[in-house]
Image (cartoon, helix red, strand yellow):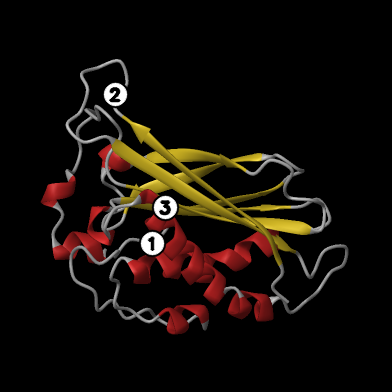
Amino acid sequence: MIQIRRVFTHVEEIRHEFGPETGAPLLRGAIGAVLTNPYAGRYEADILPMMDALQDVGLDMAQRLLAAMGVPAERIATYGKGAIVGAAGELEHGALWHVPGGYAMRELLGWKGDRNAYAKGQAEEKTGQPGNALSIVPSTKKVGGPGAALDVPLTHINASYVRSHFDAIEVRVPGAPRADEIVFILAMTTGARIHARVGGLKAEDISQWNGLR
């Protein structure tokens, strides 16, 4: 069921945005895997088998992205995910990425919950501690043609309402997706927006209770 044609990785380093240069550059990375869509061109009522099949893909992509960024997991401060579905597919096919993509990054960063319970629609047991990717991974998806761009949202890994870390990264894979393909995307960064200064809760003020909300 899983046939990967291409894997595209992008890492950027931001030193400043017109203001003074920061001490450590902000790293932003994204990875996109181009897969054949087994449901392209037809309506399939039960698409959950692909969600299960994507779990190993998610774990591999998360590990590849972290390696490409060249930092330890403790440096990752924000994350996000997305999908671009080729024209012969439907938007719902992109939604298959929610569990395998999101929980792959959360587990990589130390979350201790139960993603299988989430996949079955049961209550999620939040057993993590601060610093363990407690926040839901923000997501977006669209149907698009080859070379379509997607703005993947990014929020803080432990409290999605940390204003300084609200961000997005544009991702496009040249020549993909074809009509019968899907591009599944993961994204991570090492910090807040450069020169963030619009107030709100600060990352260093996050408590365990903040993260669990």
Contact? badges 3 and 2 (CB < 8 Å): no
Up-down relation of residue 84 to residue 21 (above or below): below
The picture places residue 112, in percent across and down from the top left corner, at 29, 78
Name the residue at 20% across, 63% down: 131
Q: Closer to the camera, 62 or 158?
A: 62
Separation of residues labelled 1 and 2 (CA atoms):
28 Å
The picture places residue 194, in percent across and down from the top left corner, at 28, 30
The picture places residue 159, in percent across and down from the top left corner, at 27, 55
Q: Residues within 10 Å of mark 1 (few under 14, many from 20)?
A: some
Label number found at residue 16:
2
Q: Closer to the observer: label 1 or label 2? A: 2
Q: Earlier in the sequence, mark 3 or mark 2?
A: 2
Up-down relation of residue 139 to residue 213 (above or below): above
Q: Earlier in the sequence, mark 3 or mark 1?
A: 3
Name the residue at 59% across, 73% down: 54
| Residue bearing mark 3 | 68
Name the residue at 20% across, 38% down: 200
Separation of residues labelled 3 and 1 (CA atoms):
23 Å
**Amino acid tagged 3:** Ala
Query: SS for tag 1?
Result: loop
